[in-house]
Amino acid sequence: MPSSKNKSALQEKKSDSHSNLSAISAERIKSLRREKKDINELIQGVLKGNKTALSQAITLIESRSKRHTDDIKTVISSCLPHANKSLRIGITGVPGVGKSTFIEQLGLRLTHEGHKVAVLAVDPSSSVSRGSILGDKTRMEKLVQEPNAFIRPTASSESLGGVARKTRESILLCEAAGFDILLVETVGVGQSETTVHSMTDFFLLLKLAGAGDELQGIKRGIIEMADAIIINKSDGENIKPAKRAKVEFTNALHMYPAKQNGWSPKVKLASALNNVGIEKVWTMISKYATIVKSNGFFENKRAYQNQFWLTQTIEDSLKREFYQNETIKAEFPEVLKKIQSQQMSPFEAADYLLKKAKL
């Protein structure tokens, strides 16, 4: 039997253990309270239009860490009632077409008219290093200094259509922060631009004259989605080619069926570098907004977009869960070997893995 001295030592050890556990629990409770307080302060900062808080909130929702899941849900659900009060404009075009200069000039015009403008600029990422340029703040030197402007460059990484993961949620946060004009710039290097079209109200395509793609542009696809085509860099010796390109694109647009929204896509000339034609572009966009809001298309399109993003989110979540499944991680290499050795077809392998995942 243990001596009274040993009993006393055991009791002291248990007491110390309980004290340590109590201290850890107390610290954990304090930590949770601090986190909750921080999240509430972050949300309030966003709703007050604080750009630092907005940047931090967007960084949070871009996190892939599971420990941030609850906080992300809290931020989005708290901001959602204050969102959906902006005009969302998608802007795309190949690299070198002058998107950043065009967006800066349009943004400056809008802020000078009293609008609050948020630019969500998606930079191309390397598929090898995952690095990105993230240089939009550097390129938009004047706009970034405007108190009523917010620029958020984000790496596109593996996102569909060059639109960064969580861009949809970033739009909601910007709207909750009081920004009434959202400019969403896409990479424009060949990915499907359907994604940006599915989250904006007006889709603007920038083109260059004399780039050799006028006739190719007549093909169905991105041209068909565009609500307007802007021939940028229409200045100097490029004015004549730009006018010819305008005629070609205008004729091409007449070949497409009429849009259900009652709007006929326009072709405009502009020189963002010289700040020419920007006012006409904004007048055109304003006219479009008036038409689609009066005929009910604006609300119908937003409803359709919400449905699209519901299904898109479910698909993304299922895909993520599938590849994070421990059984799939263990089985995948062997199944891949069987495919490569012709022992199993890809379709048979997919069916086998899906049954194993039990999704």
Image (spheres, helix red, strand yellow):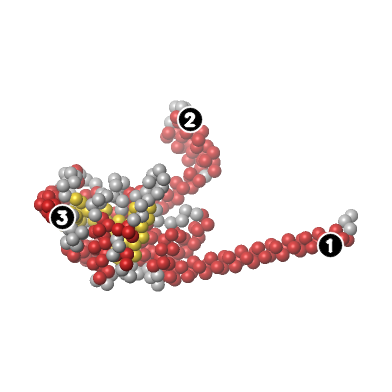
Q: Upstream in the sequence, badge 1 or badge 2? A: 1
Residue receiving disc 2: 338
Q: Secondary structure at mark 3?
A: loop
Q: Upstream in the sequence, badge 1 or badge 3? A: 1
Q: Is residue 233 visible?
A: yes
36 with respect to 123 (left or right): right
- Residue drawn at (12%, 52%), measured in percent from left and top? 237
Number of other residues with Cα within 10 Å of mark 3, as a class: few under 14, some 14 to 19, many 20 or more: many
Q: Upstream in the sequence, badge 2 or badge 3? A: 3
> As rendered, which of 285 and 355 lies closer to the eye?
285
- Residue drawn at (46%, 68%), measured in percent from left and top? 42
> As rendered, which of 175 and 77 lies closer to the eye?
175
- Residue drawn at (26%, 55%), measured in percent from left and top? 99
Residue 281 versus residue 64 in the image, above or below:
below
Number of other residues with Cα within 10 Å of mark 1, as a class: few under 14, some 14 to 19, many 20 or more: few
Percent of width and height locating residue 144: 32, 64
Q: CA distance from mark 2 to mark 3?
A: 57 Å
Percent of width and height locating residue 153: 36, 57
Label 2 sits on what residue type?
Answer: Lys
Percent of width and height locating residue 8: 84, 62
Residue receiving disc 1: 8
- Which of the image's four quarters has the N terminus? bottom right
34 with respect to 15 (left or right): left
The image's mark for residue 234 is 3
220 with respect to 184 (left or right): left
Q: Between tags 1 and 3, which lies in front?
A: 3
Q: Secondary structure at mark 2?
A: helix
Label 1 sits on what residue type?
Answer: Ser
Label 3 sits on what residue type?
Answer: Ser
Q: CA distance from mark 1 to mark 2?
A: 64 Å
> As rendered, which of 181 and 345 lies closer to the eye?
181
